[in-house]
């Protein structure tokens, strides 16, 4: 018998291995095989008979060493998902399987065992017998009857009831478009209760875009279902913890799986519901290795399984909006906050007239003072880490650049020490005492980061209890949870936060949100920049006054957006605040995309190359471009290839980066071209080359 094995070998197809006598393997089994001088874990793609032990290649096939009996067999639906992802994102099946399997489980030694000694994996999972899973994936459950702890949950309002009924009724993916605070999670909980009650073996997958959002939503789900087995998967977990969660989900023992984007690749033998929370978030797109969109794969998997897929967001992506307009997605609106609180009032602060001191206008400082006096919490949102994004010389204009990347280094303050850190390659340098160009000692900082805003607030409000939420201040999931708990217990008065506080959090005492600088993203030339900025501002504004009933004078929740371009249409719409005005601006963005033929009305791919030598990278990109032109011309394809351009930043971690962009109005034509181009790309092994389908950015 010959088995075709999928291995993590970029550019190589499935490899044939001999199944020795007595070794039985099926498609979906995990096996240990020799590869060169190594031993690796691979996934069986197919098994067949062959009288030729060389497999027709003229050499003796190597044999499969063992089947990993401790790993559950991957079901056909998951195999189909992996196969689709490999074909669509131009990777091998082995690369997809390797991305799906936790790193610790890919180590052959953990699967070794003796006659009287269980494997290390068996020892770890002594309470989870993977052999109990039946062929259809159904595993006996310790608590087969789901119990929703309804006492702690408020009743559904009319809009939520309609949304729940639509989720259960619709065969199409459902876009749950609810304003911030409208109770989308409450709908998820009722939906989970209904699905789990229908089938005692049913499983549900809940995706969130960031690690920081997993504690809150997993805690709410576990509180609502105290008798149900729930597991969490994300990259912040230790390898063994992640492996245990993966195995419990893959054997059906975990009925609810909460995770970030990699969780969509976890086998779930009886998945009956998929929820993608904050579906608009671009963190669902993997930016290295297998560059996949977890949201899009979730939609594909839901169709394959014929199970409900709910895409929830207060600011749906333009792609999902377009799908709803085309009728491919159902759409359900939640227009009211579940608590009955009115939306916070938004005011635009003109920084030309009200010049900021250390990032804060006088109006913002006054509002913070008022909030603190009333015993309320305030949030200052600044989407930049560190002290200052630029260190420069006023005398000659010099700026501190990263030696390995063509970007400025960010000035950070660590206790009493100062460091320059590159946010791209993580290189660190001490700041210079004088300008290296003109020797001037008059070095200045430009712009404000979260650290500088924090210090300014401490100086202005010395008696306020302050917490900073960014990747420097809360470097671990435990630190993040501790800070969030302190905020919820009202042990924090002032919050300084970056992107991680913009969505998903519900702080009952928060009444004021100040956006320190809304202009930075406006200068971004990328076609998605306006959409991302608009979504971020709506999301962060939605943190204010979520539990405030307001008064006759209007809502007491307040949002201040500081900008130097107050007449911009985006800020005009935000200050107006009415739903029809906000939807009108979303419609304008969608029309701009349609007129330009950009996603979701056109399809993009990028072939990106890099090399330590700048001329090699440029030459490689030019040669790839020539190959593409020849293939397009020969096939008369409706695909346009743009001449190579440097990426932004052009140099990253010591490598120069170029790219060739492809555009088409027909997805199949673009996919066919990329498939034919794959063979040509193997000739560029001296370069680092990767294909990105549906790139988030053109830079």
Image (cartoon, rainbow, N blue to C red):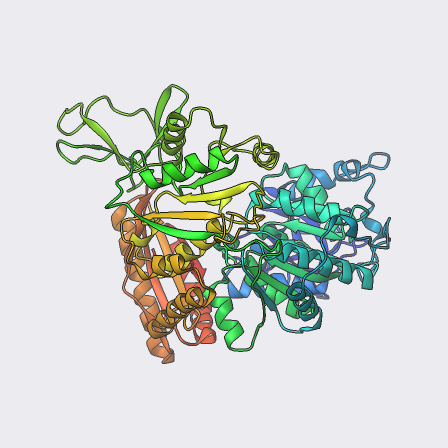
**For the point 66% across and 60% down, which residue is it?**
274
* Nearer to the camera, 644 or 549: 549
x and y percent of residue 312 in the render? 58, 60
* Nearer to the camera, 377 or 174: 377
Task: Determine which quarter of the picture holds residue 645.
Answer: bottom left
| Above or below: residue 347 compared with residue 178 | above
Q: Could one spot residue 67 in this view of the protein?
A: no
Task: Determine which quarter of the picture holds residue 50.
Answer: bottom right
Q: Could one spot residue 384 in this view of the protein?
A: yes
x and y percent of residue 454 in the render? 41, 31
Residue at the farthest bottom position = 636
Q: Quadrant of the C terminus?
A: bottom left
Residue at the farthest top position = 416
**For the point 35% across and 78% down, which residue is it?**
634
x and y percent of residue 401 in the render? 27, 36
Q: What is the tally of numbered marks visible in this picture?
A: 0
- In the picture, measured across the screen, residue 586 lies left or right of residue 105, that is left
| Above or below: residue 443 compared with residue 172 | above
């Amino acid at each position: 018998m010959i088995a075709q094995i999928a291995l993590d070998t970029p550019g190589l197809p499935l490899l044939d291995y001999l199944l020795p006598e007595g070794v039985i393997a099926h498609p979906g089994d995990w096996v240990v095989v020799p590869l060169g001088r190594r031993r690796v874990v691979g996934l069986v793609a197919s098994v067949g008979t062959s009288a030729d032990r060389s497999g027709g290649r003229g050499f003796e096939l190597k044999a499969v060493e063992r089947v990993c009996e401790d790993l559950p067999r991957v079901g056909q639906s998951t195999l189909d998902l992996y196969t689709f992802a490999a074909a669509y994102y131009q990777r091998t099946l082995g690369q997809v399987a390797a991305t799906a399997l936790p790193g610790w489980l890919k180590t052959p030694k953990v699967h070794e065992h003796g006659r009287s000694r269980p494997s290390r994996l068996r020892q770890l999972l002594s309470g989870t017998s993977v052999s109990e899973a039946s062929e259809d994936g159904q595993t006996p459950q310790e608590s087969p009857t789901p119990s929703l702890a309804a006492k702690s949950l408020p009743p559904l309002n009319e809009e939520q009831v309609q949304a729940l009924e639509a989720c259960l009724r619709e065969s199409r993916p459902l876009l749950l478009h609810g304003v911030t605070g409208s109770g989308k999670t409450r709908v998820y909980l009722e939906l989970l209760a209904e699905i789990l009650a229908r089938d005692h073996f049913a499983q549900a997958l809940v995706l969130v875009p960031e690690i920081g959002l997993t504690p809150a939503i997993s805690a709410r789900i576990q509180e609502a279902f105290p008798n149900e087995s729930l597991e969490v998967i994300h990259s912040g977990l230790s390898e063994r913890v992640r492996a245990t969660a993966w195995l419990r989900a893959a054997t059906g023992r975990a009925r609810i799986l909460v995770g970030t984007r990699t969780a969509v690749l976890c086998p779930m033998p009886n998945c009956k519901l998929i929820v993608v929370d904050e579906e608009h978030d671009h963190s669902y797109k993997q930016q290295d290795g297998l560059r996949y969109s977890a949201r899009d794969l979730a939609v594909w998997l839901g169709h394959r399984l014929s199970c409900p897929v709910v895409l929830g967001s207060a600011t749906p992506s333009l792609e999902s909006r377009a799908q709803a307009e085309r009728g491919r997605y159902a759409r359900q609106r939640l227009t009211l906050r579940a608590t009955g609180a009115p939306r916070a009032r938004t005011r635009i602060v003109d920084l030309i007239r009200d010049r900021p001191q250390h990032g804060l206008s006088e109006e913002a400082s006054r509002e913070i003072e008022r909030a603190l006096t009333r015993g309320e919490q305030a949030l200052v949102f600044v989407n930049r880490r560190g002290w200052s994004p630029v260190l420069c010389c006023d005398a000659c204009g010099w700026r501190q650049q990263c030696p390995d990347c063509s970007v400025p280094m960010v000035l950070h303050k660590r206790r009493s020490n100062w460091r320059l850190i590159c946010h791209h390659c993580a290189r660190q340098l001490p700041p210079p005492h004088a300008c290296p160009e003109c020797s001037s000692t008059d070095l200045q900082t430009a712009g404000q980061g979260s650290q500088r805003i924090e210090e300014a607030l401490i100086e202005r409000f010395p008696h306020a209890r302050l917490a900073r939420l960014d990747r420097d201040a809360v470097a671990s999931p435990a630190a993040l949870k501790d800070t969030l708990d302190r905020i919820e217990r009202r042990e924090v008065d002032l919050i300084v936060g970056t992107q991680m506080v913009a969505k998903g959090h519900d702080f009952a005492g928060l009444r004021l949100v100040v956006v320190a600088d809304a202009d930075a993203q406006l200068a971004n030339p990328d076609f998605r920049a306006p959409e991302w900025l608009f979504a971020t501002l709506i999301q962060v504004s939605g943190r204010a006054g979520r539990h405030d009933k307001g008064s006759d004078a209007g809502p007491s929740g307040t949002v201040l957006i500081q900008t130097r371009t107050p007449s911009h249409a985006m800020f005009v719409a935000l200050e107006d605040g009415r739903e029809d005005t906000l939807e009108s601006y979303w419609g304008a963005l969608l029309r701009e995309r349609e007129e330009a033929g950009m996603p979701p009305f056109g399809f993009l791919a990028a072939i990106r190359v890099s090399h330590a030598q700048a001329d090699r990278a440029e030459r490689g990109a030019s040669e790839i471009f020539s190959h593409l032109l020849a293939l397009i011309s020969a096939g008369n394809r409706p695909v346009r290839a743009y001449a190579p351009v440097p990426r932004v930043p052009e140099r990253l971690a010591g490598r120069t980066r170029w790219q060739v962009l492809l555009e088409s109005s027909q997805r199949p034509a673009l996919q066919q071209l990329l498939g034919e181009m794959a063979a040509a790309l193997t000739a560029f092994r001296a370069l680092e080359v990767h294909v990105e389908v549906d790139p988030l950015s053109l830079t």
